[in-house]
Image (tube, grey):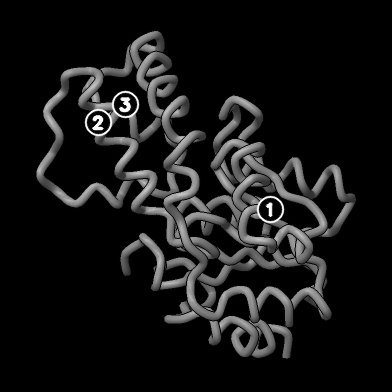
């Protein structure tokens, strides 16, 4: 029986590509690294240090940390607010919060995730918001979910994860949690292969949860 639902944030609740990608380009410019011509929306969702390593072409921890610092200093001032809720998602959260206990589990640093939720006035729908730590440490989704399960003392068999990237699905599966993928986010079909269900819009989420509970 499903009692608790974990939501990813970027690409599931909010369309945050504009702010994230824009700040990534600023970071690369500051580092005097050529900005790729490719679509950079792939940076939305995965642990950010992982994406930065690819972007700068260097895994040296000091260089990655320096790049991340440039990004975050800019992002918390501007990029964080270049963001919007997906159409219909607030109505879905409102409906689900009357039937289930909701949580956010995101790779975004916890303070940033809480700021976003408060900014859009959706924090009231969630019992707690779990992110990658104040400074982005522990970004792996399985560890974030594990921390939530332990702190809330809830049974993973009574949980469901909803997200748009393979990190969400794999993080959930690591704890025996079933997962729903959303195709309207930033993942691709290959990333959805191990999800229990795939939905194409927020308004499909409640019905999909009901079908899994039957």
Measure the C-alpha gap from mark 3 to mark 1: 30 Å
Nearer to me, 39 or 198: 39
- Whether residue 186 is visible: yes
The picture places residue 181, in percent across and down from the top left corner, at 49, 69
Question: For the N terminus, which image quadrant?
Answer: bottom right
Residue at the (39%, 14%) spot, across then down: 66
The picture places residue 165, in percent across and down from the top left corner, at 44, 57
- 172 is higher (above) or lower (below) than 46: below
Which quadrant of the figure has residue 112?
top right
Q: Nearer the viewer, mark 1 or mark 2?
A: 1
Q: Residues within 10 Å of mark 1 (few under 14, many from 20)?
A: few
- 166 is higher (above) or lower (below) than 96: above
The picture places residue 17, in percent across and down from the top left corner, at 36, 53
Q: Which residue is mark 2?
A: 55
Q: Nearer the viewer, mark 3 or mark 1?
A: 1
The picture places residue 149, in percent across and down from the top left corner, at 79, 49
Q: Residues within 10 Å of mark 2 (few under 14, many from 20)?
A: many
Which quadrant of the figure has residue 131?
top right
Q: Residues within 10 Å of mark 3 (few under 14, many from 20)?
A: some
Nearer to me, 99 or 31: 31
- 7 is higher (above) or lower (below) than 77: below
Question: For the C terminus, which image quadrant?
Answer: bottom right
* 102 lies left or right of 77: right
Q: Which residue is mark 1?
A: 118
Q: Which mark is residue 53?
A: 3
Tags 3 and 2 touching, CB below 8 Å:
yes
Nearer to me, 166 or 41: 41
Residue at the (65%, 28%) spot, across then down: 134
**Residue farthest right in this picture:** 153
Q: Which mark is residue 142?
A: none
């Amino acid at each position: 029986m499903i009692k608790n639902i974990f939501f990813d944030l970027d690409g599931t609740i909010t369309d945050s590509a504009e702010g994230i990608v824009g700040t990534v380009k600023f970071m690369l410019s500051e580092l005097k690294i050529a900005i790729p011509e490719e679509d950079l929306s792939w940076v939305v969702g995965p642990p950010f240090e992982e994406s930065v390593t690819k972007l700068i072409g260097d895994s040296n921890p000091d260089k990655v940390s320096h790049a991340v610092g440039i990004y975050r200093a800019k992002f918390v001032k501007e990029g964080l607010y270049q963001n919007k809720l997906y159409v219909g998602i607030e109505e879905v959260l409102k409906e689900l919060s009357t039937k289930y206990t909701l949580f956010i589990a995101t790779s975004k640093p916890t303070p940033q995730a809480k700021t976003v939720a408060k900014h859009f006035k959706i924090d009231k729908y969630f019992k707690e918001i779990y992110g990658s730590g104040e400074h982005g440490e522990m970004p792996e989704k399985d560890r974030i979910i594990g921390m939530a399960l332990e702190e809330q003392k809830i049974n993973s068999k009574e949980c469901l994860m909803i997200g748009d990237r393979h990190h969400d699905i794999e993080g959930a599966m690591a704890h025996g949690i079933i997962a729903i993928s959303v195709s309207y986010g930033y993942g691709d079909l290959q990333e959805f292969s191990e999800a229990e269900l795939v939905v194409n819009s927020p308004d499909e989420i409640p019905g999909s949860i009901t079908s899994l509970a039957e």
